[in-house]
């Protein structure tokens, strides 16, 4: 589509950008107390809700039986962006995640009082970048959108400059992120050198018919470029061996932003992996076409190995953590491995499971971080010891955290159980020895994860609290948000069909 027509399809991004500019301008004015406490978060939520309402209004008909819209072939700005169910589904997810982050951030002690306008403006710019990344259909757009997300992430990670831990986390994130971006960009340059094109569709046609792969050097160059780009994607979703930044960054970043960081980049990273491998290699059910096109490399097997190693390392490392944010960081790494099982399964069922699990993961993981934010605000720490006796000091908060931990472990009757059920079902549907082995690894890791989630439960209900530990206030936005997310976790564990319908709609691209 032409540029003028394409603007009609990016109204949510335009709304987010406009509101971010307004927030930056207001923050440059006198920082009155009213602006800090109400106007800045209120305007941020207004912009997010406006963008979300546009998306929901446009997609609701396609999800529930109406016109599905552009399933394939609809491109914007002459091929830079795509407009399809996959992009719209993940845009809804990241806008919802950013809204939850803003609610959790209200009143957080981790945010310096004089800089809340810039904070909320950067959140909206990061959300805009994630929306663009979920719809990117060209490698240059992938890089620009990813850098938009990354630069905002670096700033927000080190936002609490009063703490050395936050500054250290920001610096580590910049260094790791710079290396990952450079590696990914080098992979893109190899692709362009081989085929003279960076659009997904152009690369697909080139891989199928170009003579660049006729020799061994061309095949190795194409293989190396895919590996380098997958390294950049893997860094975004914190998959092993690209996970090194995750624990330190999650621990040092302001807790409300850590909640968004654990979900938003992971969601758009998964959407990017699905779109990249499908569009370029075209594997609706398997990756045999990829094996034949680029040097006999078994990509499905390699992604399955990354999935198994990621979930295993994440769960084993989480066993010995005494800081709840680091524990949830390694849990996030493990969940990246679980989600990659759906990518490995491929096809409609596998990609539907990826979409459904990402929505479920958003709810339960951001809810868990909302509880951590509450405890941190009251006690000034997120160590496991400050959770002692939480069942008596704040029964509602402890109950909400229990629901999230049970869901993260994948136990019924929670949404986490349904999400893992869809992932394992997609693998079993494929059949075959390697898919069954990956499912077995996933089940084993789910059992292992019970231990470190149970440690938090034990601390809350079976250990006595220190006498100087304060009570946890429940009359604030973070507590209300956590409670609402706990209800959603239980509701979707019992009535998941509407979410499954939306996830199936998002995967119509992969018929």
Image (spheres, rainbow, N blue to C red):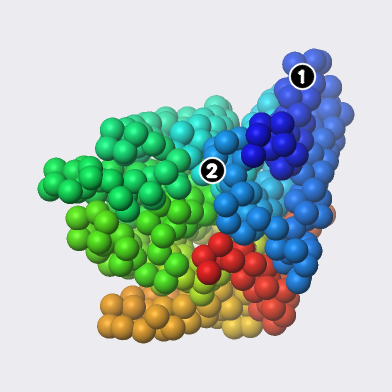
Residue at x 70% of width, y 58% of height: 69
For mark 1, does the 10 Å Cα neighbourhood hold few (<14), some (14 to 19), or many (20 or more) residues? few
Q: Give the residue at x 50% y 32%.
A: 144
Residue 25 - label: 1
The secondary structure type at the circle numbered 2 is loop
Q: Is residue 498 left or right of residue 173?
A: right
Q: Position of residue 408 (x, y in %)?
A: 54, 69
Residue at the top extreme of this rendering: 29
**Residue 276 percent location from the top left of the image:** 44, 51
Mark 2: few/some/many CA within 10 Å (<14, 14-19, 20+): many
Residue 339 is left or right of residue 55, and the answer is left
Helix, strand or loop under label 1: helix
Q: Position of residue 77 (x, y in %)?
A: 61, 35
> Are the residues tagged 2 and 1 within 8 Å (C-beta)?
no
- Residue 377 to residue 36: above or below: below
According to the picture, the residue beneath numbered tag 2 turns out to be 136
Q: Is residue 492 above or below residue 74?
A: below
| Towards the viewer: 329 or 431 | 431
- Image quarter where the N terminus lies is top right
| Foreground pick, 480 / 384 | 480
Q: Residue at x 81, y 50 (%)?
A: 53
Q: CA distance from mark 2 to mark 1?
A: 29 Å
Vertical arrangement, residue 58 with respect to residue 121, above or below: below
Residue 342: in sight, yes or no? Answer: no
Residue found at the far left of this picture: 216
For residue 186, the mark is none
Q: Is residue 496 visible?
A: yes
Q: Quadrant of residue 419?
A: bottom right
Of pointers 2 and 1, the one earlier in the residue sequence: 1
Nearest the viewer among 63 and 288 is: 288
Residue depicted at 26% across the width and 62% down the height: 291
Percent x, y of residue 227: 28, 48
């Amino acid at each position: 589509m032409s540029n003028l027509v394409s603007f009609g399809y990016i109204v949510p991004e335009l709304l987010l950008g406009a509101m971010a500019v307004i927030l930056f301008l207001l923050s440059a004015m006198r920082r009155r107390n009213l602006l800090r406490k109400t106007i800045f978060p209120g305007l941020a939520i207004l912009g997010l809700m406006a963008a979300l309402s546009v998306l929901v209004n446009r997609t609701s008909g396609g999800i529930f039986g109406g016109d599905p819209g552009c399933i394939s072939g609809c491109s914007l700005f002459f091929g830079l962006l795509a407009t399809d169910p996959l992009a719209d589904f993940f845009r809804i997810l990241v806008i919802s995640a950013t809204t939850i982050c803003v609610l959790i951030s209200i009143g957080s002690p981790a945010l310096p009082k004089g800089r809340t306008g810039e904070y909320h403006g950067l959140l909206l710019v990061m959300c805009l970048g994630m929306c663009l990344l979920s719809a990117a259909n060209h490698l240059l757009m992938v890089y620009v959108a990813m850098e938009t997300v990354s630069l905002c992430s670096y700033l927000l990670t080190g936002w609490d400059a009063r703490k050395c831990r936050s500054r250290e986390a920001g610096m580590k994130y910049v260094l790791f992120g710079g290396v990952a971006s450079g590696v990914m960009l080098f992979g893109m340059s190899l692709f362009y050198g081989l085929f003279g094109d960076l659009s997904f569709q152009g690369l697909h046609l080139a891989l199928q018919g170009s003579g660049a792969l006729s020799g061994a050097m061309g095949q190795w160059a194409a293989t190396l470029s895919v590996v380098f780009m997958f390294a950049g994607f893997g860094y975004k979703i914190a998959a092993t061996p690209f996970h090194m930044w995750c624990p330190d960054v999650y621990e040092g970043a302001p807790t409300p932003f850590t909640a968004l960081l654990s979900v938003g980049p992971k969601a758009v990273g998964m959407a990017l992996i699905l779109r990249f491998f499908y569009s370029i290699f075209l594997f609706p059910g398997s990756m045999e076409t990829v094996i034949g096109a680029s040097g006999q490399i078994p990509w499905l097997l390699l992604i399955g190995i990354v999935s198994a190693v990621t979930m295993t390392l994440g769960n084993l490392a989480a066993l010995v953590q005494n800081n709840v944010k680091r524990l949830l960081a390694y849990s996030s790494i493990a969940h990246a491995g679980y989600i990659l099982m759906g990518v490995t399964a491929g096809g409609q069922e596998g990609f539907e499971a990826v979409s459904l699990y990402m929505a479920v993961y958003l709810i339960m993981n951001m809810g868990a971080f909302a509880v951590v934010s509450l405890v941190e605000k009251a006690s000034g720490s997120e160590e496991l010891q400050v959770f002692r006796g939480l069942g008596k000091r704040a029964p509602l908060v402890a109950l909400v955290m229990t629901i999230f931990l049970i869901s993260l472990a994948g136990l019924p009757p929670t949404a986490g159980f349904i999400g893992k059920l869809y992932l394992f079902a997609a693998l079993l549907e494929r059949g075959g020895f390697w898919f069954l082995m990956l499912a077995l690894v996933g089940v084993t890791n789910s059992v292992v994860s019970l231990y470190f989630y149970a440690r938090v439960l034990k601390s809350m209900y079976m250990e006595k609290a220190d006498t100087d530990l304060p009570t946890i206030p429940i009359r604030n936005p973070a507590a209300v948000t956590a409670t609402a997310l706990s209800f959603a976790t239980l509701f979707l564990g019992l009535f998941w069909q509407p979410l499954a319908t939306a996830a199936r709609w998002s995967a119509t691209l992969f018929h």
